[in-house]
Image (spheres, grey):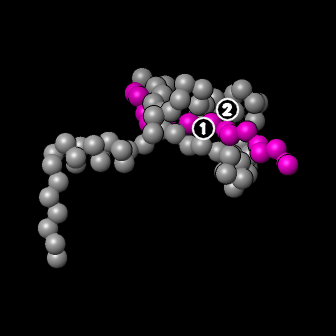
Amino acid sequence: MARVTVSESELLAALADAGPKPAPPHALTAAELREKLGLNSTALKKRLSRLKAEGRLEIWQTAREDVTGRVQGVPAYTIKPAKRPR
């Protein structure tokens, strides 16, 4: 088996690129979407699943403070516009 040599900077860059993408400022968590849209968890999950199946849902990682003050990593979502029929 061939030996691969990788510098420390190349390894660090590859690890940074492999991590979760930071969320844009307009991305919303499920809790934020439920509150803004007035939906329960089940209804929101169905809508997010449909958008994901359509290829319109972008999923990011963001940090939010929980009720105990701890910062937790949570998914946040942005939605791509629907494609217009030609």
Q: Secondary structure at mark 2?
A: helix
Work out whether residue 52 or residue 13 is closer to the camera in this orientation and state it: 13
Residue located farthest toward the front when viewing the structure as drawn: 86
Q: Nearer the viewer, residue 31 or 55?
A: 55
* Residue 58 x %, y %: 59, 43
Nearest to the eye among marks 1 and 2: give it: 1
Instruction: Name the quadrant containing residue 39.
Output: top right
Q: Quadrant of residue 70?
A: top left
Q: Which residues are magenta?
A: 70-86
Question: Mark 1 or mark 2, which has the lower sequence index?
Answer: 2
**Residue 83: where, in percent of width, then height?**
77, 45
On residue 33, the disc is 2
Q: Is residue 58 visible?
A: yes
Residue 39 inside the magenta-drawn segment:
no
Quadrant of residue 13 within the rendered picture? top left
Is the Cβ of the residue at disc 1 closer than 8 Å to that at disc 2?
A: yes
Q: Is residue 69 above or below residue 28?
A: above
State the quadrant of the N terminus.
Answer: bottom left
Give the class, few, some or many, for how many residues have Cα within 10 Å of label 2's Cα (few <14, many ≥20): some
Residue type of the residue flagged with mark 2: Leu
Q: Is residue 22 left or right of residue 80?
A: left
Q: Look at 55% across and 24% down and name the residue there.
A: 25
Label 1 element class = strand
Percent coordinates x, y for residue 19 in the rendering: 38, 44
CA neighbours of label 1 inside 10 A, class few (<14), some (14 to 19), many (20+): many
State yes or no: residue 83 in magenta.
Answer: yes
Residue under circle 1? 77
Give me the residue at 48% from left, 28% from top.
Answer: 64
Residue type, numbered disc 1: Tyr
